[in-house]
Amino acid sequence: MSYRCPEGHTSASGDYCDVCGAPIQAAQPSAPAPSAAAPTTAIPTGPAVCPNCSYPNEAGALFCENCGYDFTTGSLPEADPFTESGAVRAPGEVGGSATPAGDPGAHPGEAPAPAADPEAPTAFVPEQEAGFDVPVATAPPTEVIPEPEPAPAPVESEDEPWIAELWIDPEWYADQRADDPMPSAGPPDVVVLRERSLLVGRPSVSRGISPEIDCGTDSGVSRRHCQLSTDGYRWWVEDLQSANGTYLAPAGAALPQTPIAPGQRREIEEGDRLYVGAWTRIVLRKALPGEA
């Protein structure tokens, strides 16, 4: 006696289909097929439920879409070494068994990460890389010896005193051919020049003349002979229309023969000599320490 399952398969068992495993509950025994008739293929009428995993497959499916059960031979699928036993995929999931995490085949071309060896020594990480502040060794401060500041260059003060040396010059006396006798030559008379403008001449009480540079007994010098002026650094001379003129010559030069023009200032260069009267020679210079 044979039975027909809901899927249209012929089964010798009356409880489950021998072909698809579908339960045969109210199915009636099928009529014996005529021996001479050609075998016919049953037309599936509903979903094919897999007897292995109970997954509802489409009618007429040859294999279970979930576990690969062979509906035609009734053989179970081969076990997948990468699939856990008894795993069942959800309905609608297509393909073979679920790929477990860490499956090398899930990411072709990528080598699986090696498993950590629990007995392997932990790599030492410097404290600075681990997020700790590492004290930096600093060299002890070296003593800085300041360089001595250069001494400032001496600045000529406008109030720095000057000196006028008054000499008795025999050569000048011989060149002038004066009638008065010349005094004996000796050390010069030194006059400190503290004013910006000084009169050179001879004093006169009646006329109220008191020159800053007094030429004494030289009768060839006028009462108001010439004027000396300075800005603190340079000196000038101006003849005041004297009777015998004012002469200017560089140091070491021959005696001058031409007086300077009256009323015109002439600058006195360093080392110049002034000649006035019958024998007087005047030299200007800065005062030495203790002279002023």
Image: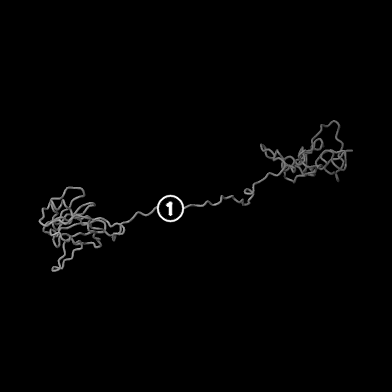
Report the residue that reaches farthest toward the top: 36
Report the residue that reaches farthest toward the front: 184
Quadrant housing the C terminus: bottom left
Element type at mark 1:
loop
Q: Residue at x 85, y 35 (%)?
A: 33
Q: Residue at x 83, y 41 (%)?
A: 21
Q: Is residue 96 above or below residue 287?
A: above
Q: Nearer the viewer, residue 125 or 162?
A: 162
Residue 200 as seen in the image, left or right of residue 106: left
**The disc labelled 1 sits on which kind of residue?**
Pro
Q: Which residue is mark 1?
A: 148
Residue 261 as seen in the image, left or right of residue 95: left
Q: How many marks?
A: 1
Q: Nearer the viewer, residue 231 or 10?
A: 231
Q: Residues within 10 Å of mark 1 (few under 14, many from 20)?
A: few
Where residue 241 appears, x then y in whole percent? Answer: 12, 59
Q: Nearer the viewer, residue 151 or 202?
A: 202
Coloration mode: one colour
Residue 46 sits in quarter: top right
* Res 42 seen here: no
Where residue 29 appears, x then y in whole percent? Answer: 87, 41
Residue 237 as seen in the image, left or right of residue 30: left
Residue 242 sits in quarter: bottom left
Where residue 238 appears, x then y in whole percent? Answer: 17, 58
Q: Is residue 247 above or below residue 28?
A: below
Quadrant housing the N terminus: top right
Q: Nearer the viewer, residue 156 or 82?
A: 156
Report the residue that reaches farthest toward the right: 1
Where residue 134 appears, x then y in whole percent? Answer: 61, 50
Residue 82 sits in quarter: top right
* Res 268 seen here: yes
